[in-house]
Amino acid sequence: MTLDHVFVSFEGELANVANEPALVQLKARYLGREGVVTRLRKDIDFNALSPEEKRSFGQNFNDLKTRVEQAIEAAAARFAESVVETVDFDRTLPGTDRRLGAIHPIISTQIEVEDLLRSMGFQVYAGDEAVSEFENFDALNIPGDHPARDMQDTFWLENGMVLRTHTSSMQNRAMRALGVPVRAIFPGRCFRNEATDITHENTFYQLEGLMVDKDVSVANLIGVMRELLSGVFRRDIEVRLRPGFFPFVEPGFELDFKTTLNGVERWIELMPCGMIHPAVLRNAGVDPDVYSGFAFGLGLTRLAMLKYGVSDVRLFNKGDLRFYEQFRATL
Ligand code: PHE
């Protein structure tokens, strides 16, 4: 068979190839080790050829091989294209569920609040969940016989430490460790010996903040709180203060923010706060005649309930995946 004949017969076979496997077979039959094209060169007796004939054979052989290879490549490309076009694939189906999990709604709220306060110059100072009785109570102006201890009954450890009832327990340690002036926040888990219902849990999250400097006033407190809440709710938030009693602040306040619920304007109680009591400053080695400061105790659990419209606080700790999976979008 001459080289030209080989190509004609190849073209004839290629025209009948209907799919990729058949093309692979055809390729092997022509270009494989024992293929028709390969054999052409193996079988020829080069000694019988003049130098001229050798050169011309070589050229024609290479031409043929290239044409066969190119024709096969072109056919392969056509098959590849048509596969994409005809495959039975519904592009509107949801993607494969990789089950990456989600950030717990309280933690995502915490991260957001931390970011906002960091942008106002506060540093995050993490604390311990088990603290001394002094840090949780006495340093905060709550001596052993104070009635406030009844409201914050907690779990006592055998070594005399307590599971902290509030993040205020970090105030003393932070002022000592960081010195003044200081702007710091302490987020974390708190515990109370409490009967649970839709608004009470024995385990919950707070985020405490304090700012101590010369000439800090209630105006600074209001400014920081407005900025923070406007960031969390992504609109301008109005706040108001009402008197509130806590032994470690003087004056003490309950901070409310204004919201519209079903077309009706309402004030929602959100966070206790106040000017740090002189005795609390003194307990941390800070001179109250030189320095003043404010502190606030943001209920992260409560804020997450407001933000996401969760009506039962117990859902956060229950471990029910149907609840957590609704927050997957917050990843
Ligand atoms: N620690 C208080 C509580 O848990 C809240 C609070 C913090 C009040 C800071 C005033 C200032 O109830």
Image (cartoon, rainbow, N blue to C red):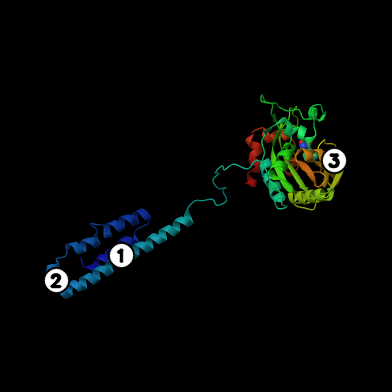
Please name the residue that numbered disc 3 is placed on.
250
Query: Measured along the vertical axis of the image, is residue 65 above or below residue 169?
Result: below
Between discs 2 and 3, the one toward the N terminus: 2
- Residue extending farthest to the top is 158
Query: Measured along the vertical axis of the image, is residue 134 above or below residue 255?
Result: above
The spot of residue 119 in percent (x, y) is 70, 53
Disc 2 residue lies near ligand 1 with CB under 8 A:
no
Which of the 4 image quadrants contains residue 319?
Answer: top right
> Residue at left 77%, top 47%?
212
Instruction: Report the mark closest to the observer, 2 or 1.
Output: 2
- Residue extending farthest to the right is 243
- Residue extending farthest to the left is 48
> Residue at left 40%, top 61%?
77
Foreground: 20 or 101?
Answer: 101
Badge number at residue 254: none
Gap in angstroms between the C-alphas marked 3 and 1: 93 Å
The spot of residue 81 in percent (x, y) is 44, 59
Mark 2 and 1 residues: CB-CB less than 8 Å, in contact?
Answer: no
**Residue 320 relative to residue 9: left or right:** right
Foreground: 232 or 172?
Answer: 172
Gap in angstroms between the C-alphas marked 2 and 1: 25 Å
Is residue 277 something that shows in the picture? no
Q: Amino acid at mark 3?
A: Glu
The spot of residue 286 in percent (x, y) is 77, 43
Q: Amino acid at mark 1?
A: Val
Q: Amino acid at mark 2?
A: Leu
Badge number at residue 68: 1
The residue tagged with tag 1: helix, strand or loop?
Answer: helix
Badge number at residue 49: 2
The spot of residue 317 in percent (x, y) is 67, 34
> Residue at left 79%, top 48%?
225
The residue tagged with tag 3: helix, strand or loop?
Answer: strand
